[in-house]
Image (spheres, rainbow, N blue to C red):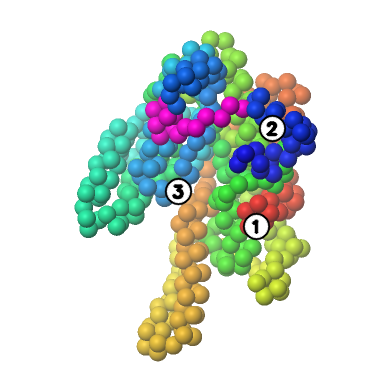
Amino acid sequence: MQVIGKELFGLLRETHGKRFHSFIEEKVVPLAGDIIHENLGVEGPQLRRMTRELNVIVNGAATTNFYERYDVALDVNVMGVKHICQLAKQCPNLEVVLHVSTAYVVGEKQGMILERAFKQGETLRMETELDMDAELRVARDYQQQVAGDDAEQKNERKAMKELGLARARELGWPNTYVFTKALGEMMLARELGGVVPAVIVRPSIITSIHKEPLPGWMEGTRTIDAILIGYAKQSLSCFLADLQLTMDVIPGDMVVNAMMAATVAHASAPGGHKEESPTVYHATSSLRNPAPYAVLYRTGIRYFCDHPRVGKDGRPVRTRKVHFFGTVAAFTAYMLLRYRLPLELLRLLSLLSGGLLFSRLYADLDRKYRFVMHLVDLYGPFALFKGIFDDANMERLRMAMPVADRLEFNFDPNTIDWDDYFYKIHIPGVMKYVLK
């Protein structure tokens, strides 16, 4: 009920009326499970039935926190994949495993980025080596060490987060999320290579639904949405971004359509194509229909001018321009002069005077400063990303589909008018479903 009660299922509910719940029960058999456990925690008759009847496995489970605890990220994004693969090898009728990754497993590469699977032990930094099993041991041993130290127990969460970030950056990835997703891809290839057909779909920044079943729908805050929310609340006055660079975004329904097409193509392939490396598909837009960050900015200004937010005092919130900086150096210099130095002065005055006025000013500026720096730390590498994702595999997949299916299950980014999409669909969706 928690899932099917969402507005997203409104079209099905309208179509089937009183038979809606019966329809769902005929199509869906929910099982309680968790990919951090072997066999997903499923046992006994349920496990035997599941392994006997499964034809396709789609793994979209992940922790997407950029600065997740290292042990948690490895449990979900790496060991979770291993458990999926172990389950797959128990299924005699299985035709394909589709694994959802992210296009940003490539780190901060520039130029044309091909749809290529990682080699085992591959890193993004020269003269470094990667051993998945060693990484798992490092995280486990460090967690036990910190947990066993009374003085460190209070800082265990922070210590495990910092370990993940340190390991990621040492090997060339900008954060724990994309690093462990890359490890997950390697685990998939290691466990299933030559055994079960495997496919990897790498979406870029997933945005709200474009067409079906509910335009604008989304759940949770993702990347550019956090920037939109900050702008809507007028708590964002500057940001690190080059407006001329391409932001690679793709609507969620197009990602799902691409996943279904890839699943059908590989499940139907003669002999299953049990290759040593998974086939990779980029669900992206930067090559065929690039959208610069300027599109998001101008549609944002237009939308909030036409639909002003109302503040707590009941008055319309004035839409102000945001200052964008195309380099880290320029942004850092601005933040130093605009916020850091005044903050230090206010902190000193507050200490000397003990007055509420300076304390309130300091708290307000400090909040804004921390908010912007938090966003930049999270999304800066995306805002300055200079890669273009090749999608030759995805385009071949699309062109192999019957014309009617291409239209019904559309994932062609060329069909999107970005100005129209952001102004009429995505930004209203953020306001309705995220910033409630």
Task: Find the distance from the CA under tag 2 to the CA under tag 3.
Answer: 37 Å
Outermost residue, top direction?
A: 271
Label annotation for residue 436: 1
Q: Residue at x 72, y 38 (%)?
A: 213
In this rendering, is residue 229 above or below 310? Answer: above
Quadrant holding the N terminus = top right
Q: Identify the mark nearer the N-term, 1 or 3.
A: 3
Q: CA distance from mark 1 to mark 2?
A: 28 Å
The location of residue 204, given as percent across then percent down, is 56, 41
Horizontal arrangement in the rendering, residue 327 relative to residue 415 (left or right): left
Q: Which residue is mark 3?
A: 66
Query: Quick check: 211 above or below 335?
Result: above
Nearest to N terminus: mark 1 or mark 2: 2
Amino acid type at circle 3 is Phe
Mark 1, mark 3: which one is toward the viewer? 1
Q: Is residue 310 magenta?
A: no
Q: Which of the numbered marks, if any, corresponds to residue 421?
A: none
The residue beneath circle 2 is 21
| Residue 228 coordinates in the image, percent (x, y) | 62, 58
Looking at the rendered image, the disc whose residue lies closer to the viewer, 2 or 3, is: 2
Magenta span: predominant SS is: loop
- Extreme residue in the bottom direction: 353
- Tell me where the magenta segment starts and ends, as one range: 28-41
Residue 34 shown in magenta: yes
Asked if residue 204 lies left or right of residue 23, the reply is left
